[in-house]
């Protein structure tokens, strides 16, 4: 369809059926209509009328497995009903031109698919990286024009960068490969873009959760062939809502803190001649604690202890959800938060002790929830967001408490989105 034809479709009642899997909360459908019309208008201003395609990729929530993925561990994660959308059109000159709302226009020539040092840390690196990784995997890539707009807040712990990467992969799959690139392959290409081109060390959790969609458990024991399994569970059916609160902490200068977590875990693994902790039997690790403490210090040892226990907690959470034992699930979520706080130590930066917004949010969560629900640090940590499973009768009290601390709209009441990267037809 052309831009004008898409506008007519978006204004019609038929449009709701096209995006219902992406929105989940039906009260948001009318707002989404306005959002898509805005995106189409902006694309037309930049690139003119003519045939276009619509795409979407969601943010994600890590439900279980805090910092387990980069050691080839297990995670429990879900996609969310907040997304980044694109209006895109294929072009035949091998150039990608993307206008993300609120940012400068990015243009990348795919005649060069290798990393460009000057682009490290920029969105151009992600454009080139996703295309380069997919080309290396044997898929067709090519140029396109696109306008994107996002509800996935930067620094929110919902993985705005992974959502953007998955969106790019989904566009290339739709425009050049008849939507045949699997969500797993899109996620892998997205990780390559972030690691090799953008220059940020990360595991595969973020990209996989955004790409695959729904509530899934993923085992990264074989990173070349991660095992993904959907979990049939609805938090609402248990009388709880998933709440993510943005504590508005600055992510500036936190890269060393994030990078230290996998680096210290790998330091422990290297002591045993291995690359990641997944390759080191727990009993062997525990037998060497005195030696490891002396050689590497206590924090790497504590973080390794967290990894082994957190990996097992993912299995506990999955089993609890599948057996409909939500109390056991909540207990495991709280244990995860406790371990992240004490052993992983990613609730604030040791270099910025005056800034402890996440601990404050967790403390107030305890005061509001008392012995009900669960709360924990969300995502990479050090600044950003917390996650809570809040009994429905306390949701409004919880929202008011969090918004009172961090500003109106800080607390997001979210839903699990049943699909990941999506080509809207």
Image: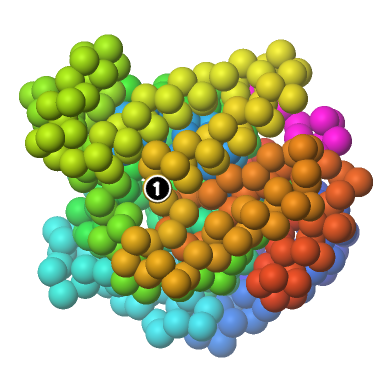
Residue at left offset 21%, top offset 45%: 263
Residue at left offset 51%, top offset 83%: 102
Task: Report the magenta residues as a range.
Answer: 231-240
According to the picture, the residue beneath numbered tag 1 turns out to be 345
Residue 239 can be seen, yes or no: yes
Q: Is residue 233 left or right of residue 211?
A: right
Disc 1 crowd rating (10 Å Cα; few below 14, some 14-19, many 20+) is: some
Residue 286, percent across and down?
Answer: 26, 18
Residue 183, percent across and down?
Answer: 46, 38
Residue 380, percent across and down?
Answer: 43, 51
Residue at left offset 43%, top offset 64%: 90
Q: Is residue 298 left or right of residue 267?
A: right
Of 336 and 350, the residue lying toward us = 350
SS under mark 1: loop
As drawn, the residue found furthest toward the right would be: 393
Q: Is residue 163 above or below residue 277?
A: below
Residue 235 among those drawn in magenta: yes
The quadrant the N terminus occupies is bottom right
Q: Quadrant of residue 409?
A: bottom right
Residue at left offset 39%, top offset 42%: 344
């Amino acid at each position: 369809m052309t831009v004008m034809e898409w506008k007519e479709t978006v204004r019609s009642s038929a449009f709701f059926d096209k995006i219902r899997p992406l929105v989940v909360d039906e009260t948001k459908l009318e707002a989404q209509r306005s959002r898509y019309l805005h995106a189409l208008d902006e694309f037309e201003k930049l690139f003119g009328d003519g045939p276009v395609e619509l795409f979407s990729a969601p943010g994600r929530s890590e439900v279980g497995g805090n910092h387990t993925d980069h050691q080839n561990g297990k995670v429990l994660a879900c996609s969310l009903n907040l997304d980044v959308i694109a209006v895109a059109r294929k072009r035949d000159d091998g150039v990608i031109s993307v206008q993300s709302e609120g940012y400068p226009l990015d243009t990348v020539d795919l005649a060069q698919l290798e990393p460009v040092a000057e682009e490290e840390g920029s969105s151009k690196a992600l454009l080139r990286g996703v295309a380069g990784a997919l080309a290396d995997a044997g898929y067709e890539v090519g140029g396109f024009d696109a306008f994107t707009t996002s509800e996935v807040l930067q620094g929110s712990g919902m993985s705005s960068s992974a959502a953007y990467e998955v969106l790019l992969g989904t566009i290339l799959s739709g425009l050049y490969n008849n939507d045949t690139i699997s969500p797993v392959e899109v996620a892998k290409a997205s990780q390559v873009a972030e690691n090799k081109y953008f220059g940020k060390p990360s595991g595969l959790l973020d990209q996989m959760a955004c790409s695959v969609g729904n509530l899934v458990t993923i085992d990264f024991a074989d990173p070349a062939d991660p095992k993904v399994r959907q979990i049939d569970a609805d938090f609402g059916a248990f009388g709880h809502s998933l709440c993510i609160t943005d504590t508005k902490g600055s992510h500036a200068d936190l890269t060393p803190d994030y990078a230290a977590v996998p680096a210290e875990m790998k330091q422990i693994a290297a002591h045993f001649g291995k690359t990641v902790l997944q390759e080191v039997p727990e009993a062997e690790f525990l037998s060497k604690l005195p030696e490891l403490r002396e050689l590497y210090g206590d924090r790497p040892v504590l973080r390794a202890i967290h990894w082994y226990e957190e990996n097992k907690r993912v299995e506990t959470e999955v089993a609890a959800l599948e057996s409909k034992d939500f109390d056991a699930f909540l207990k495991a979520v709280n244990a995860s938060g406790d371990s992240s706080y004490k052993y992983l130590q990613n609730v604030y930066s040791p270099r910025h002790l005056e800034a402890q917004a996440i601990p404050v949010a967790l403390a107030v969560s305890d005061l509001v929830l008392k012995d009900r629900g669960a709360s924990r640090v969300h995502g990479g940590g050090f600044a950003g967001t917390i996650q809570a499973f809040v009994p429905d009768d306390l949701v409004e009290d919880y929202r008011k408490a969090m918004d009172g601390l961090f500003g109106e709209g800080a607390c997001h009441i979210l839903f699990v989105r049943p699909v990941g990267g999506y080509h809207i037809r």
